[in-house]
Amino acid sequence: MSDAYVPVFADYHQFVIGDSEAFATGEQEVQQNPDPTGLIITPHRMWAYIATGVSIGPVAVNLRLRSEVPSSHGLTEWEDVAEVSLFVRDGEKIAAFDLDQTGASSPALAPAPGWHRVRVHARGRDARYDLPTDVPVEQYLIEVWHAPFRPAEKVKLTSAAGVSLLAAWGDQDEGFAP
């Protein structure tokens, strides 16, 4: 399977994954503690912030809809990996987009309604940590599949950016129920 990365604009060290309409209307139903992963910040019911190393600029994002749980084979290619559950209402789509929704976004996925698991893979977050960039130096693979709700999970965390973010928030492994 070939990867097609699209640039998504990161600002304030983050971009968003989830339903853009729910994000735009300000639905603020927080379902889990802030950042227990070092990669996914403040998961909400239908969207979450993804933490970047760059302070501002494009990051390369590839979004995949899976029919089943993806294999853990290939995780060694990534510095940081985390999972979170997101809810999709009927007719909604999942995409990666910038905070003000004016820039390029990833192609939108249209999964079936219900809970989905989202696995975020990241690499390159230390390359220009806390600096602006004009070209993507970070890559993200985001895989989505239908699955029951589970709390956020830190799968792998090796970047200095992720470790420092986790330390800043504290290692909060407990999640909230949906």
Image (tube, rainbow, N blue to C red):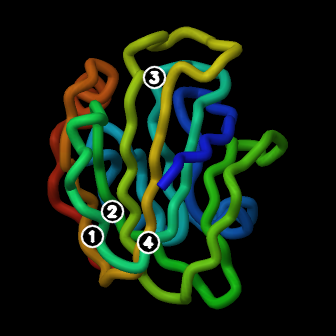
Judge whether 47 appears above or below 150 on screen: above
Disc 4 designates what residue? 66
Judge whether 40 appears above or below 7 on screen: below
Disc 1 designates what residue? 176
- The three-letter amino acid code for the residue at tag 1 is Phe
Disc 2 designates what residue? 32
Q: How far apart, in angstroms, are the residues tagged by discs 3 and 4?
A: 27 Å
Decide which of tag 4 and tag 2 comes sooner along the chain.
2
Q: Residues within 10 Å of mark 4 (few under 14, many from 20)?
A: some
Relative placement, left or right, of 111 versus 84 is right
Labels 1 & 2 near each other (Cβ < 8 A): yes
Q: Residues within 10 Å of mark 1 (few under 14, many from 20)?
A: few
Q: How far apart, in angstroms, are the residues tagged by discs 1 and 2?
A: 5 Å
Q: Secondary structure at mark 2?
A: loop
The structure residue drawn at horizontal position 74% and vertical position 60%, both measured from the top left corner, is 24
Q: Nearer the viewer, residue 27 or 94?
A: 94
Looking at the picture, how far across and down is residue 153, in whole percent? 22, 56
Q: Residues within 10 Å of mark 2 (few under 14, many from 20)?
A: many
The structure residue drawn at horizontal position 68% and vertical position 35%, both measured from the top left corner, is 7
Q: How far apart, in angstroms, are the residues tagged by discs 3 and 2?
A: 22 Å
Q: Secondary structure at mark 4?
A: loop
Q: How far apart, in angstroms, are the residues tagged by discs 4 and 2?
A: 24 Å
Labels 3 & 2 near each other (Cβ < 8 A): no
Looking at the picture, how far across and down is residue 32, in whole percent? 33, 62
Looking at the picture, how far across and down is residue 38, in whole percent? 29, 37
Dot in front, 3 or 2: 3
